[in-house]
Amino acid sequence: MRDEAGFRMFVETNGATLLHAARLLTGDHHRGEDLVQGALTKVYLKWDRIDAPLAYARKALVTGHIDSTRRKWWGERPTEILPDEPGRADGLAASDERDELRRLLGELNPRERAVVVLRYYCDQSEQETAAALGMPVGTVKSTCARALARLRVEAAASMGGQP
Amino acid sequence: MSPNEFQLRSALRDGEGDRVNPETVIARARGMQQARHDRRVRYGSVAAVVAIVGGIGVVGGVILGGSGTGKTFSANGGGGSNAGDKAANSGQAARGTASAGQPNPAMASGPMHDAAAVPCPDSPPKLVVPGGGGSGQFGAQGPLFSGPVEAVKVCAYASSTTGVVPSLVLAGDSATDLTKSIEAADKTLPASIKCASGPAPTDPIDRGSLVIIGVDQDGNPMKPVVVTLGCPTRVTNGTALRYSWTPPANLTALIPQGLKSAPGGGPISLPPPGKVTGSPIQS
């Protein structure tokens, strides 16, 4: 019999963090919800067989996100109406540094974004991040350094300053 | 702006707070489990049906093949000689010929099935040979078979046949080749015939008979053709007549042993077998 009470407790405790991480990874509110639902469903189906459900959920989250970015149907969709996204100049005028950083985060590639989210939002160590992403620690370090450098350069450029 | 780690963490944490409803996740997971279960059941059902149908096919094939072999054995009696075995073991390939030991898919339906269903007469029909066996009579040189033959049933008779009649079914090229070879035999009595026991007698020495019943493409049996083995061998359907046709060894092997020798004469050395081959099946 599956320990549903334990799973409910796990979701109550960690669901919000995982949902926010999923939104950071996808850069989209609804796709983030779908992503976290899929990851938590995988956790539920293996609840009795996994020792570290939170780590498993994080791994399912980033794996699901990277997989989804490989699928064609997440690609560009033709539309007559442009989405209501703030342009750079408008964004600078209308948003603060946090919004700008979130926007720049969305311009990183999926793997870089996953490293940044796991390291700086989920507070994972380099080893844990490497385990979650299935890559060597050295790759995590280099990917993280490259992502932060891009964020600095692009943030400085968007504000018209120097990095 | 050059964000430091604190600013980055702060930016990443901005906006968090929405919760996930565990019931939604559990409902979704249960739906997924049910879908998986249904899929497994569906695949399992399909696999089971395929296995059952395949098993029925194999068993049916074995029963069909087994019943053919069994009937051949019983038809040939339980004595020391078994014409069916001899024909089956002749070692000659037989296209379109029912095999004694293996199920033949062609037996399930089609001309071979139709031919096998044709019963052998209890004794060879006594046909009045046109002109008393002489040549040159009206219709004597006509065809023995009324049309193209899809299969033939060959029934074998000794001089005094009693009980079951050994038989053989040929189909396809084997049947066609057999009928062609009969049709191509001498249409007139050869001027000189040398027999094993001396000059050709006026009446052929009876060494047994074969009755060949052709089956057309619609599965209808044709008029029986009677082959009277002797010197010379005589083939007739009551109208047309052929002489000196040499039946293949697998057909003569159907005739019960001990009756192929001429009465009072030496053993007949039959010519080498022709192209047509076969093995006995149902009688």
Image (cartoon, grey):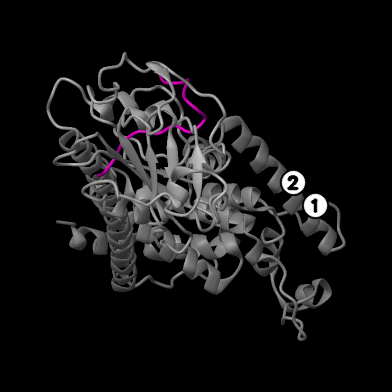
Amino acid type shown at disc 1: Val
Label 1 to label 2, Cα distance in Å?
Answer: 6 Å
User: From which residue to which does the magenta span run?
Assistant: B270-283
Q: Say what secondary structure mark 2 lies in.
A: helix
Amino acid type shown at disc 2: Ala
Picture quarter with the N terminus of chain B? bottom right
CB-based contact (under 8 Å), mark 1 and mark 2: yes
Residue matched to label 1: A153
Picture quarter with the C terminus of chain B? top left
The chain letter for the residue carrying disc 1 is: A
Q: Is residue B241 left or right of residue A108?
A: left
Kindly identify the residue that appears in the image at 38 percent across and 64 percent down. Answer: A15
Whole-percent x and y of residue A40?
A: 37, 60
**Residue in the foreground of this view, choosing between A73 and A142:** A73
Kindly identify the residue that appears in the image at 22 percent across and 25 percent down. Answer: B82
Q: Say what secondary structure mark 1 lies in.
A: helix
Whole-percent x and y of residue A53?
A: 33, 49
Q: Residue placed farthest to the bottom in the image?
A: A81
Q: Tell me, yes or no, if residue A129 can be seen here.
A: no
Mark 1 closeness class: few <14, some 14–19, many ≥20 residues within 10 Å: some
Residue matched to label 2: A149
- What is the magenta segment's predominant secondary structure? loop
**Residue in the foreground of this view, choosing between B11 and B96:** B96
Q: Tell me, yes or no, if residue B93 can be seen here.
A: yes
Whole-percent x and y of residue B195?
A: 43, 19
**Residue in the foreground of this view, choosing between B64 and A43:** B64
**Residue in the foreground of this view, choosing between B189 and B184:** B189
